[in-house]
């Protein structure tokens, strides 16, 4: 089984519950884990497919703009590709954001996370993966952008789990801006437990799962894993490395300008996370969008929310795009 299927496929398995429960649980698939060939002209900018180290990426630059600012776009959890699509959900979140930013004269670099499209031998053994590898990848891409000399400034934009990667990368690399889009303020293991506790899962199934997550976070191997928790023992240290990272203290140490954006229809990350991040970075600019969901589109109800996870042509929230663009293009005052 590939790293992509083991990690991004991390999910509740064999849980028998009402159809409504399962429908809502599918909204959490993306987080339940917990990831130069040629040039072409896109509708909103010039796109170049490039390879940086072992990472496949797409660089989008606005036409007729010399030395634009650039934003590194970091995707959320799982084996997510450069467009922001994974095995189960395909909202094209990063592709749409890149196009909108190009319209506003901002370049972007987005990339395939480890595991997207299958696990590459260059990344070593899947069971040896640790969360810091995601951070190292982001740092290497920031350094690439900075070293190219082609951009006026370098911003890092993290979506969901990508926000945690962005926070940690911003402590190691020279970035000019940090943007957190629907990012959790809790350890991912704690966030996952909170999500599961909201679901109508029978206690005889839920309780062993919560206990197993605690054990994995404590560095223990749970073998066999309980019914409903499809994490092979060999992969549990990889998950533990992601589950135990707390974003708050690292965020407090960042002195660069920060923008924090949250959405009222986000069923994966709560408003308390938005509030906690804002408290940890009191000088940050903040934006709360009541109608926006986790994949950055405006929705009306649960059914609309679920549908948005597989609507790649659906427009992302315009106010969010405007805020990100203005922030990336602003002067250097915090």
Image (cartoon, grey):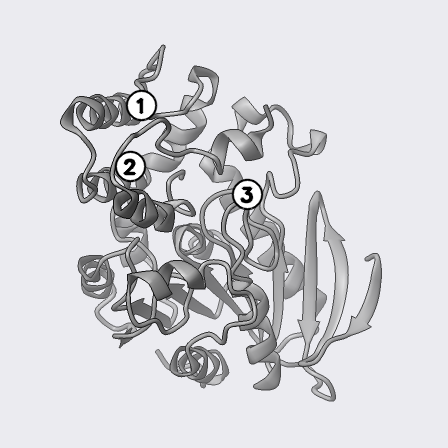
Q: CA distance from mark 2 to mark 3?
A: 18 Å
Q: Secondary structure at mark 3?
A: loop
Residue 212, quarter of picture: top left
Q: Secondary structure at mark 1?
A: helix
Q: Residue furthest front?
A: 19
Residue occupied by mark 3: 79
Q: Are marks 2 and 1 in contact (CB under 8 Å)?
A: yes
The disc label shown at residue 216, or none: 1
Tell me which numbered mark, 2 or 1, is placed earlier along the sequence: 2
Using residue 99 as the reference point, say whether residue 173 is left or right of it.
left
Task: Look at the picture and state if 203 lies above or below 225.
Answer: below
| Relative depth, front residue between 285 and 204 | 204
Q: Position of residue 116 (x, y in %)?
A: 61, 43
Q: Secondary structure at mark 2?
A: helix
State the quadrant of the C terminus: bottom left
- Residue displayed at 71% across by 46% down: 53
Residue occupied by mark 2: 189
């Amino acid at each position: 089984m590939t790293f992509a299927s083991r990690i991004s496929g991390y999910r509740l398995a064999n849980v028998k519950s009402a159809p409504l429960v399962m429908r809502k649980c599918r909204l959490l698939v993306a987080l339940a884990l917990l990831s130069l060939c040629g040039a072409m002209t896109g509708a909103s900018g010039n796109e170049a497919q490039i390879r940086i180290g072992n990472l496949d990426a797409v660089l989008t630059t606005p036409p007729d703009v010399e030395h634009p600012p650039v934003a590194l776009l970091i995707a959320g959890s799982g084996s997510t590709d450069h467009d922001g699509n994974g095995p189960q959900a395909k909202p094209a979140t990063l592709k749409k954001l890149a196009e909108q930013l190009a319209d506003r004269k901002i370049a972007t670099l987005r990339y395939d996370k480890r595991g997207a499209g299958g696990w590459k031998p260059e990344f070593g053994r899947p069971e040896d993966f640790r969360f810091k590898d995601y951070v190292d990848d982001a740092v290497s891409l920031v350094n690439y952008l900075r070293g190219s000399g082609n951009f006026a400034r370098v911003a890092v934009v993290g979506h969901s789990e990508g926000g945690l990667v962005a926070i940690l990368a911003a402590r190691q690399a020279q970035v000019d801006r940090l943007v957190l889009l629907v990012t959790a303020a809790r350890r991912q293991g704690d966030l996952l437990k909170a999500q599961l506790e909201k679901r109508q899962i029978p206690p005889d199934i839920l309780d062993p799962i919560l206990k197993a997550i605690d054990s994995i976070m404590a560095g223990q191997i749970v073998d066999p894993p309980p019914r409903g928790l499809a994490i092979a023992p060999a992969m549990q240290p990889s998950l533990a490395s992601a589950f135990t990272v707390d974003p708050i203290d690292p965020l407090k140490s960042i002195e660069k300008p920060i923008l924090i954006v949250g959405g009222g229809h986000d069923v994966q990350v709560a408003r308390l996370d938005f509030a906690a991040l804002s408290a940890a970075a009191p000088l940050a600019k903040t934006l709360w969008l009541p109608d926006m969901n986790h994949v950055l589109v405006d929705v009306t109800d649960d059914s609309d929310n679920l549908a948005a996870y597989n609507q790649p042509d659906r427009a992302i929230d315009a106010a969010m795009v405007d805020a990100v663009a203005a922030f990336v293009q602003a002067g250097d005052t915090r």
